[in-house]
Image (cartoon, rainbow, N blue to C red):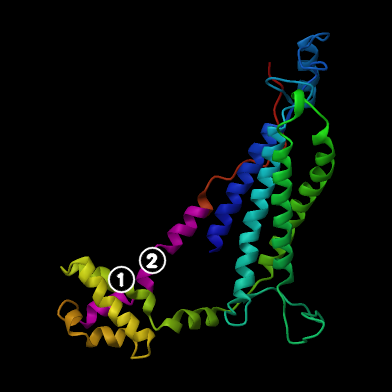
Amino acid sequence: MFAGFYAELGRARAALVAARTEIAVGKIAGAVGTYANLDPAIELAALTALGLRRETVPTQIVARDRHAGYFQALARLGTAVERIAVTVRHWQRTEVGEATEAFGKGQKGSSAMPHKKNPILSENLCGIARLLRGYGASALEDVALWHERDISHSSVERVIGPDATGLADFAVRRAAGLVDGLVVNADRMRRNLELTGGLFFSEAVLLALVHAGMARQAAYELVQRNALASVEGKGSFRALLAADRDIAARLDAAAIDRAFDLEHHLRHANAIIDRALADDVPSTSTSTGKGTP
């Protein structure tokens, strides 16, 4: 799960770095972008000194699809953080109880119910993600301007520019603190895993029957009838499988044991984590390069 969060945040970071590069342009090309009374060399010299590139086809302003890309990248980052927060909120539910946010001494979870430990950090992050997506939508509305430049985008950007950037920074910092302080209940995770009585091994049993020569549809029906019987309280899934003559004709006790081997199912987990950690991370350099003709 956390490897997936890490990989997604890496992609969001790469999108933000790309958006920063795309937006790092300027223009000094006159009122309508045609250099009517300016030499393009002046623009190039000025922008190069600032570490900016020239807008490809300027009008009175820099094209706003560039800015929209930046705000979309912030929204994507916020959504990646929200996926962590939503998961923590689920884990912290009473009936799940697999992990909780850190709860400090003297902290209150509810003004009315002293027993509560509310996931306030996660809930806050989910709200921030909604704002960031809203800012992204507002930025898209700024792309199509009347007659190559009206002023309608200006009032929007004065609000969403500082707000979205500051909120994204706050969200990342808060998410880091949330993960750092997370209290994990491994015993509860195992108990929850065992609640189904091994029903999640049904696919492995199905495939074992197929490998033993049974047609897949027939194997599916055999496994399903025992799984449903277990759900109805007629016995444990494993015991029902062992007692089923049609299954016993294909699988002995050792084969069923192998199908119920959790370690077999998790044998590639470390390789997946290593793959996530080995993914290239985009440079954090603040340099945008020199201007180009």
x 70%, y 73%: residue: 119
Q: Which residue is mark 2?
A: 267
Looking at the image, residue 192 sits to the left or right of residue 30; the answer is left
Q: Residues within 10 Å of mark 1 (few under 14, many from 20)?
A: some
x 58%, y 79%: residue: 185
Q: Which residue is mark 1?
A: 204
Range covered by the magenta-colored residues: 252-276
Tag in front: 2 or 1: 1
Q: Position of residue 174 (x, y in %)?
A: 74, 61
Q: Position of residue 289 (x, y in %)?
A: 70, 27
Looking at the image, residue 135 sits to the left or right of residue 236; the answer is right
Q: Please say whether residue 192 is one of the residues in the magenta stretch.
A: no
x 77%, y 53%: residue: 167
Compared to residue 89, the image places residue 77 above or below, namely above
Looking at the image, residue 74 sits to the left or right of residue 282; the answer is right
SS type, badge 1? helix
Image-quadrant location for residue 128: bottom right
